[in-house]
Image (tube, rainbow, N blue to C red):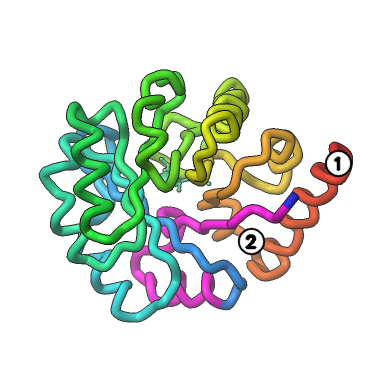
């Protein structure tokens, strides 16, 4: 069983000092950077838009994983494609013509992801699974960092893995919300591919050590099942 990808989310960084946050992710050894775009409608807070993504893009070669928590994402895809994002994930609940949107993102040469909030079942996105590069399972209600993991969402990872294996698909399964050193053992049992971490990563005194401890916690759990 391979290690998961750890994708630190700059939502929990100090927005006055984004440069240091990006450098901290780079020096921690992680290769992904998760960017939470919120519009004040799909979720209550407003964070940042495509200019922030574009400005960071100029300074880093991290894989930039944009998570759009916005209504009508199709209206903004062009600017996020132009921003230099490597992957764009939108919410199934926010988009009517989701298949068209996935095709549009991939046509632009970028990886396409679809996300579901805790109240949305996997069945709502089954038709998209053969077209997407990533499925992002929210394990908290989106909008804020530092919330508690909702364990009832974890079963969706198993459903997705089962559908993926049965149909010979290869999308990644990412989970987002409430992931920290204490919850990694209960998460690792379900074997997602990507762990998105905001507050746990940025609250760590030593992020390199934090990442090493996260992999240790993961391997320790996975070893029991192999
Ligand atoms: C929340 C965002 C998450 C957030 C996770 O809606 O999508 O990416 O940064 O934060 P933690 O890891 O603190 O739960
Ligand atoms: Zn996110």
Taking the spot 29% from the left edge, 26% from the top edge, the residue there is 93
Which is nearer the N-term, disc 1 or disc 2? 2
Q: What are the residue bounds of the magenta stretch?
A: 2-26
Checking the image for residue 204, the label placed there is 2
Q: CA distance from mark 1 to mark 2?
A: 30 Å
Task: Say if the magenta span includes residue 8.
Answer: yes
Residue under label 1: 226
- In this rendering, the answer to whether 74 lies above or below 10 is above
Q: Quarter of the image containing the C terminus? A: top right
- In this rendering, the answer to whether 94 lies above or below 80 is above
Task: Say if the magenta span includes residue 140.
Answer: no
Taking the spot 61% from the left edge, 41% from the top edge, the residue there is 192
Residue 146 visible from this viewpoint: no
Image position, residue 7 (x, y; %): 52, 57
Taking the spot 39% from the left edge, 36% from the top edge, the residue there is 115
Image position, residue 96 (x, y; %): 19, 27
């Amino acid at each position: 069983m391979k290690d998961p990808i750890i994708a630190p989310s700059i939502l929990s960084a100090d927005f006055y000092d984004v440069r240091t946050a990006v450098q901290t992710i780079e020096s921690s050894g992680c290769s992904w950077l998760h960017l939470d775009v919120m519009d004040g409608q799909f979720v209550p807070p407003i964070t940042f838009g495509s200019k922030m993504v574009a400005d960071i893009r100029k300074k880093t070669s991290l894989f930039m994983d944009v998570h759009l928590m916005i209504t009508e994402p199709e209206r903004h895809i062009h600017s996020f494609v132009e921003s230099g994002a490597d992957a764009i994930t939108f919410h199934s609940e926010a988009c009517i013509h989701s298949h068209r949107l996935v095709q549009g993102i991939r046509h632009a040469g970028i990886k396409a992801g679809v996300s579901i909030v805790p109240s949305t079942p996997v069945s709502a996105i089954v038709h998209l699974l053969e077209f997407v590069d990533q499925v992002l399972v929210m394990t908290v209600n989106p909008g804020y960092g530092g919330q508690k993991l909702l364990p009832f969402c974890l079963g969706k990872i198993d459903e997705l893995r089962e559908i993926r294996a049965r149909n010979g698909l290869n999308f990644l399964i990412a989970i987002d919300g409430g992931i920290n050193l204490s919850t990694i053992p209960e998460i690792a049992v379900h074997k997602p591919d990507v762990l998105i971490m905001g507050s746990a990563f940025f609250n760590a005194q030593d992020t390199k050590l934090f990442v090493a401890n996260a992999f240790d916690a993961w391997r320790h759990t996975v070893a029991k099942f192999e």
